[in-house]
Image (cartoon, grey):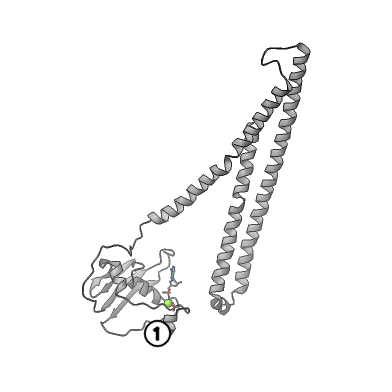
């Protein structure tokens, strides 16, 4: 009975986890395809189509590999379950028939030695159906585990306290509009995802109120990064960014952002092409 239960459990597990690995690979392939198509101009400009196609193919080949592996496991498990079930049939019927033969030969009348065909079949089917019934517990049990794992991930995202809280009520909220004096002093910064690469290495910048200013530099030199720091999407590693002489970390983040009008440079931005001259 235990063996039949275990096999049922194994089979259910195999079929449950079968799509997980492949769907992850399909999700990666889909993500790559949609990202590439939405930035098709950049992809074409960099002549990156062959690389993208080969990466896309890699994900699909990986999905196929996982699918074949899972298919083999399911096939093996199905074979095993039938083997165990038919062996159980054979052993039970053989053993039951010897018991019945003994009962008839020696004329047993007392339980448990006295056996009849009905008793043997009842015991046999009770064990078999019971074992399969317990085996059916596997999918809901595995679904509970998957649900708990999934819930843990998104609950941790919800519970995560951001370093810079854009919804916080803390910090200065001056009633007057800032004059717009921006000063960046000895500012160094690296993105949290790439802490070893310093994007800003000791930048200094002073913009007087009302002054028009253009930041000029090669691509990747940190122009947009300065705007992200001014909007407090990130904080500098060292040095300071001040607005009207006050470090922007002291202001309420939502208030600070409401004082700045920013039009992103993305080529899809209608605002950028329409309103900037
Ligand atoms: N979110 C991010 N995470 C990690 N690195 C980033 C991130 N955003 C930008 N970078 C890197 O920081 C560097 C500076 O990028 P930034 O966008 O500030 O350059 P830029 O001067 O605005 O360039 P461009 O003229 O192309 O707009 C680049 O090397 C870029 O790859
Ligand atoms: Mg930029």
* Residue 127 point in image, percent of width and height: 65, 29
**Height in image: 217 above or below 103?**
below
- Picture residue at 59% right of the left edge, 77% below the top: 47
For residue 233, side relative to residue 57 (left or right): left
For residue 184, side relative to residue 89 (left or right): left
- Picture residue at 71% right of the left edge, 26% below the top: 121
Give ligand 2's quarter of the image.
bottom left
Foreground: 12 or 220?
12
Foreground: 111 or 80?
111
- Picture residue at 59% right of the left edge, 49% below the top: 17
Residue pointed to by mark 1: 275
* Residue 88 point in image, percent of width and height: 71, 31
Figure label count: 1
For residue 215, side relative to residue 47 (left or right): left
- Picture residue at 65% right of the left edge, 60% below the top: 61
- In the figure, residue 37 lies in which quadrant? bottom right
């Amino acid at each position: 009975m235990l063996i039949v239960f275990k096999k049922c459990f194994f089979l259910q597990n195999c079929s449950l986890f079968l799509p997980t690995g492949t769907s992850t690979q399909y999700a990666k392939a889909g993500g790559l395809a949609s990202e590439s198509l939405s930035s098709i101009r950049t992809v074409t400009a960099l002549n990156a189509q062959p690389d993208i196609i080969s990466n896309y193919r890699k994900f699909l080949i990986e999905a196929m590999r996982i699918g074949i592996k899972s298919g083999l496991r399911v096939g093996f498990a199905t074979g095993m379950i039938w083997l165990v079930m038919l062996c159980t049939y054979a052993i039970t019927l053989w053993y039951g028939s010897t018991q019945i033969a003994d009962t008839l030969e020696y004329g047993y009348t007392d339980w448990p030695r006295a056996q009849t065909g009905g008793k043997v079949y009842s015991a046999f089917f009770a064990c078999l159906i019971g074992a399969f019934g317990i085996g059916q517990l596997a999918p809901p049990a595995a679904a509970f585990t998957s649900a708990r794992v999934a819930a843990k991930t998104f609950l941790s995202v919800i519970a995560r306290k951001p370093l810079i809280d854009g919804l916080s009520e803390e910090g200065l909220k001056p009633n007057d509009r800032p004059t717009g004096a921006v000063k960046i002093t000895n500012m160094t910064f690296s993105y949290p995802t790439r802490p070893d690469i310093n994007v800003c290495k000791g930048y200094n910048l002073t913009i007087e109120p009302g002054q028009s200013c253009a930041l000029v530099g090669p691509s990747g030199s940190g122009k947009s990064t300065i705007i992200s720091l001014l909007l407090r999407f990130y904080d500098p590693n060292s040095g300071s960014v001040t607005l009207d002489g006050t470090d922007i970390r002291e202001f309420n983040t939502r208030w600070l952002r409401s004082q700045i009008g920013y039009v992103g440079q993305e080529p899809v931005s209608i605002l950028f092409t329409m309103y900037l001259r």
